[in-house]
Image: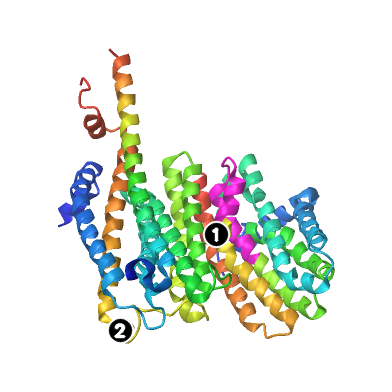
Amino acid sequence: MELLSMGGYGAYVWTAYALTFGVVIICVAQGRRRHRRVWNDLRSRLRAASERSK
Amino acid sequence: MWTFLHKLSSPPHFYDLAAKMIPWFAAASLLLIGYGTVAGLFFAPPDYQQKDAFRIIYVHVPAAYLSMMAYVVMAVSAGIGLIWRMKLAHAVAAGAAPVGAWFTFLALATGSIWGRPMWGTWWEWGDPRLTSELILLFLYFGYMALRAAIDDTARADRASAVLALVGAVNVPIIHFSVEWWSSLHQGPTLVRAGGPAIEPVMLWPLLAMILGFMLLFAALLLGRVRTEVLFRERRSRWVRKLVYPEEPA
Amino acid sequence: MSDRDPKLPGLLDGLVSVIRRDVYLAWRRPGDVLNPLFFFAIVSTLFPLAVGPDADQLALNGPGVLWVAALLAALLSLNSLFLNDYEDGTLEQLLLSPQPLPLLALAKAIAHWLVSGLPLVLVSPLVAMSFQMPARSTAVMMLTLTLGTVSLSLLGSIAAGLTVGLNRGNALLSLLVLPLAMPVLIFGARTVSLAAAGDVTSAGVYFLGAYCMLTLTLAPFATAAALRISNE
């Protein structure tokens, strides 16, 4: 329990670490989502254009 | 070597090369951050004055360093883009901004959490380092807002580059604020005359975390720049072939 | 003897003529000058009303509120710095003129200060009185406000140059100026508080002076770059 309580400062330490890992994960996810969105947008646009010109 | 650099500035080569580099950076950063976190939380002994609360250093300091480093990357690449008119440089600046903003937020948040038990306050208005770090966050927001407000990519690139360069003066202020003014925040721990003022067993996890975060930043940045490049080059042939290979010629 | 045609406008002529034009235009449109001034006066009146008549409370918070009001009033007037010129084509002419663009940018910023910052400084003793601030802080207050509003005009001109012609450029302009203006606000308000308490104020005054010098020398170049970029 020494682990969890961190000498009484547990709430502070664990919140800080959780926040850090949370933000990192959000940052990664955000980047990937944006990439996917650009890719899919572009793909559907190209597909629509090529359908039209058929 | 020059061929390599020259190729690097060509968007399709960059796109491929970055894709190959990201997993390596990500893996290395994961290892370093993993070691740093475990060693920092469980193996480093409690600090004499701060007891276990000092362990926040292992997330706060890397976040703070990276918040400044990201701004420098952003400003330098924006400057390169402005002076040498390299589109890729502008893409790097655009990619660095949101990541830098997140790290700045993290630095402020973890710093505030650390400050509460240590200084008795969540925030201290008028503290030079806290204030200049907050200014950094606003600079990032301003940069991103300016980019978003301008439709023409070229104008957006160049206008935000001017802004990034003007705001760059804030970075040395953040670093030296604790030396120039009296501040709640402690003085420099690592980059100081006489070497780091911290025990080796506590130092190693910190160095690992800093390096790990740097590699993480590199991975994140490369990913976002790839997306930027994809978007900016959307009309070009290599992108069309990449995204919609079935397209009849 | 130089063989330059003496009838061609020189550097000083360029500077003075831009300043003169802007001040004259502002004179013709008093709203431009009075609006921020009214705003400053209104905020200054509302504050004692909201906080209550306790003289000590007012005097304590007076410097801070005064400075925030000055900053907001300056922001109000910055949007139109280049906007009118942009719309009627004058800006393009400025860009094409033989004088160095940074010089003309400096002139615009100086004109802006004459029309918005200077009136503020002159009105400030009245506001200070309504905040029950001690008389001994008046001189320092006016000095710091002068240095501060000059810096704000210059920093604001950079942001105005970057956002000229954009939709909702006003809010964006404020966001861009804010981080650069924070040190001015902090040191300005602090120094006036110190003066009110009778303490030594040299540190703050020196800082504001240095900041002012820095912006005076560097901002025009950034503004010029911004204007070129916004006008391509």
In-front residue for pair C202/B184: B184
Highlighted magenta segment, given as a residue range: C150-176
Chain containing mark 2 = B
Q: Secondary structure at mark 2?
A: loop
Horizontal and vertical percent for residue C85? 64, 45
Residue drawn at (62%, 47%) of the image: C170
Image position of C78 (left or right of B76): right
Q: Secondary structure at mark 1?
A: helix
Residue at image mark 1 = C102
**In this rendering, is residue B234 above or below B92?**
above
Identify the amino acid type marked 1: Pro
Chain containing mark 1 = C
In reply to whether residue C168 is colored magenta, the answer given is yes
Quarter of the image for the C terminus of chain B: give it: top left
Q: Is residue C6 visible?
A: no
Callout 1: few (<14), some (14-19), or many (20+) C-alpha neighbours within 10 Å? some
Callout 2: few (<14), some (14-19), or many (20+) C-alpha neighbours within 10 Å? few
Residue drawn at (58%, 60%) of the image: C155
- Can marks 2 and 1 be said to lie on one chain? no
Quarter-wise, where is residue C202 in the image? bottom right
In-front residue for pair C9/B133: B133
Quarter of the image for the N terminus of chain B: give it: bottom left
Image position of C8 (left or right of B91): right
Q: Residue furthest top?
A: A54
Horizontal and vertical percent for residue B76? 36, 60
Identify the amino acid type marked 2: Gly
Residue at image mark 2 = B195
